[in-house]
Amino acid sequence: MTANKNDYVVIFDSTLRDAEQSPGASLNVPEKVEIAHQLARLGVDVIEAGFPVSSPVQFEGVQRIAREVHGPVIAGLARTVKKDIDAAVDALKDAERWRIHTFTSTSPVHMEHMLKMTPDVVLAKAVEAVKHAVSLTPDVEFSGQDATRSDRKFLVEIIQAVIEAGATTINIPDTVGYGIPEEFGDLIAFLMANVPNIQKVTISTHCHNDLGLAVANSLAGVLNGARQIECTINGLGERAGNASLEECVMTIRTRRDQFKCDTHINTQEIYRTSQLVSRLMGLEVQVNKAIVGANAFAHESGVHQDGFLKERTTYEIMKPEDVGVPRSKIVLGRHSGRHGFKVRCQELGFELTEEQLTEMYAKFIDLADKKKEIFDEDIIAILDDAMPRAGECFKLDYMQCTSGTGIPSATVRIIREGKDELLESAHGDGPVDAVYNAISKATGMDVTLENYSIRAVTGSTDALGEAMVRIRDDKRVYAGRGVSTDIIEASAKAYINALNHAAARQRNSKKQK
């Protein structure tokens, strides 16, 4: 935290409590702890670890996180009921720093139909609960559930009362995602102006995404004085989800000129955290999700690609590296222009003359009109005819590999220049690694493997496997492709294909000298 609380927005992460309530999401205790450790590396200020009284598993998860995760404040949720608060204390008491987060409903519809209590009784129970929590820890947060549909006069009354009882954070939830930014921001401003003791506490937002406005509402709250945002990784949560941590944080970071504040988040851990939560919860991140989606830093339009390649800031307001994404992507498709195609050719190790580029780009566009997605191997197939060749130097004649619980090994026989037989064996970390080591020994080529991937070209059990590799010598990158129903053979063919490109280039260089 900082001496001036207005300089920073506290990030209260509810992934382990609210996001786990997402339909289909379920975490065991070790998975909860793993995510909590990553949230600590991410730099969140508060981790809401769970609702301890709700089940033994919830209690154990909160207790283990409290004991094992260091750095953030660990919070536990509790209704305005003594047994809930006592259970939270028992689960949290071993944490370095911990918080009781107690809540009750404040809207007429909730009080009448869900709590079946009058406003006076709700207020009295809230004050009693906060006083009990404060007797056990100085860090107590109070939430008025469904605040956006609550009577403002009653909100002022109950907030003033719980602050007098000792609450240190007041949360204003948009529980059903009913608010719109102007309205929600005005609510925060109203409370800041009309609750007499409001300056003693931190005002928090907890917005749901039923109308797709959770992030916008949260940020409207910040602009009007809120200094804590309750959010989740990937925006997960009940129904349509919660405010997305990554979107809130990067908006504040990118537009500090407007918000005049920042967060303590290590943004380079954002993408890693997103992927971990997605994997453990079994919920994929939508491809067009802001900040962490697969297309967040991808460019396909020819105009966009041309502008981006000339100056990144023409079409990117953030660097992908800032959120932990390795780099931007130029996605090749029917909308791509010559510039983007030329750059991808260079990345694959092909230098084309203008005449070759014109010819190959026409073939590329023709293929792009037929295929939904263009892979690097598709481009290689197009470009192979444009590359100067000096004949095939290496050919795979024989390959045998073994793997299992022992050390994987491979033996290969390579035919060089159509006559020399090169026989070598090698070990490796796996069958593909063993084969590649044997091929390298046989050919004597001094290269570095930069990338290896494989995918199914067709469906069914007899699908073709298509391997793609990139290798580098001391000057350039060469790509190779191999296809076979045996993925090890496809991998070997791809590696030799790349070596042949390297050998051909080296020969041409020598001839030019």
Image (spheres, rainbow, N blue to C red):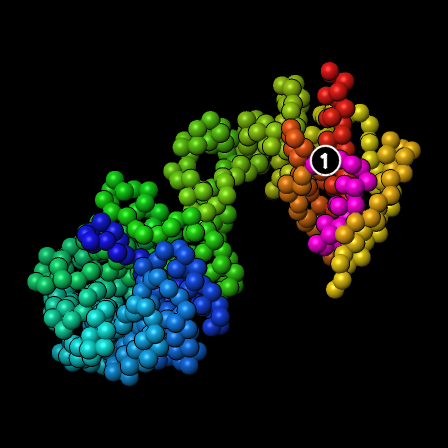
The answer to which of 47 and 143 lies nearer the viewer is: 47
- Residue 436 lies in magenta, yes or no? yes
Q: Is residue 242 left or right of residue 124?
A: right
- Residue in the picture at 23% in, 81% down: 116
Tell me, yes or no, if residue 287 can be seen here: yes
Q: Residue furthest right?
A: 419
The quadrant in which residue 314 appears is top left
Mark 1 is surrounded, within 10 Å at the Cα level, by few (under 14), some (14 to 19) or many (20 or more) other residues, namely few
- Residue 250 lies in magenta, yes or no? no
Give, as a single range, the part of the protein colored magenta: 428-447
Q: Amino acid at mark 1?
A: Asp
Query: What is the magenta segment's predominant secondary structure?
Result: helix
- Residue in the picture at 44% in, 28% down: 311
Residue 243 locus on image (x, y percent): 34, 57
- Residue in the picture at 11% in, 71% down: 164
Residue 195 locus on image (x, y percent): 10, 62
The answer to which of 423 and 246 lies nearer the viewer is: 423
Residue 57 locus on image (x, y percent): 44, 78
Tell me, yes or no, if residue 209 can be seen here: no
| Quadrant into which the N terminus falls | bottom left
- Answer above or below: position of 120 versus 371: below
- Residue in the picture at 23% in, 73% down: 137
- Answer above or below: position of 485 versus 57: above
| Quadrant into which the C terminus falls | top right
- Answer above or below: position of 131 versus 271: below
Q: Residue furthest left?
A: 196
Residue that badge 1 annotates:
446
Q: Is residue 513 left or right of residue 349?
A: right
